[in-house]
Amino acid sequence: MDTNTDTDTDSVVAEVVERELQLMSPAVRSSRALSDRLLDPEFTEVGASGRRWDRESTLSELAVMDGAADDGPRYVPTGMTGTVLAPGIVHLTFETVLDGTRARRSSIWRKLDEESGWRMYYHQATPVPEA
């Protein structure tokens, strides 16, 4: 018997969207401890620059920004949608503007257990060329 409902799916996606927005917050991005709780142990990213990041390199870079919460970059997201790909796996897509530069973004979030909750497993940003 399938117990998944649209309401369950909507609430799962809403929870993941909330966590994605937390990661875009300068206060979270400038705190290694807060970011650590949102990144999966196997996290990887391909940034808009084309650079590949792993979890430790990402957390180390964020540590450099520690305390710069008010001065940190401010992402403006639009068009955020999510899909539950399988139990414990959610895919988000959206666009951001940061300092006038647009990027299309894709994140995969996974939930290994109730204690750790949803964590970003993979992220990719692709620059959008100017019109």
Image (tube, grey):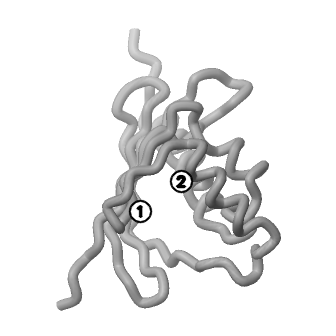
Q: Residue at x 36, y 43 (%)?
A: 83
Q: Which mark, by number, is residue 17?
A: 2
Q: Is residue 91 above or below residue 31?
A: above
Q: Residue 117 placed where, x, y %?
A: 65, 33
Other residues around mark 1 within 10 Å, as few (<14) / some (14–19) / many (≥20): some
* Residue at the extreme left of the image, as rendered: 131
* Residue at the extreme right of the image, as rendered: 67
Q: Residue at x 60, y 78 (%)?
A: 73
> In the drawing, does residue 17 fall left or right of residue 126?
right
Other residues around mark 2 within 10 Å, as few (<14) / some (14–19) / many (≥20): many
> In the drawing, does residue 26 fall left or right of residue 99?
right
Residue 12 vs residue 29, the one in the foreground: 29
Q: Which mark, by number, is residue 80?
A: 1
> Sequence order check: which comes first, mark 2 or mark 1?
2
Q: Residue 12 placed where, x, y %?
A: 53, 39
Secondary structure state at the residue bearing disc 1:
strand
Residue 39 vs residue 111, the one in the foreground: 39
Quadrant placement of the C terminus: bottom left
- Residue 21 quadrant: bottom right
Q: Gap in Å between the C-alphas at discs 2 and 1?
A: 8 Å
Quadrant placement of the N terminus: top left
Q: Residue 3 placed where, x, y %?
A: 46, 19
Q: Residue at x 43, y 80 (%)?
A: 97
Number of numbered tags placed on the structure image: 2
> In the drawing, does residue 20 fall left or right of residue 30?
left
Q: Residue 4 placed where, x, y %?
A: 44, 25
Badge 2 vs badge 1, beta-carbon distance below 8 Å: yes
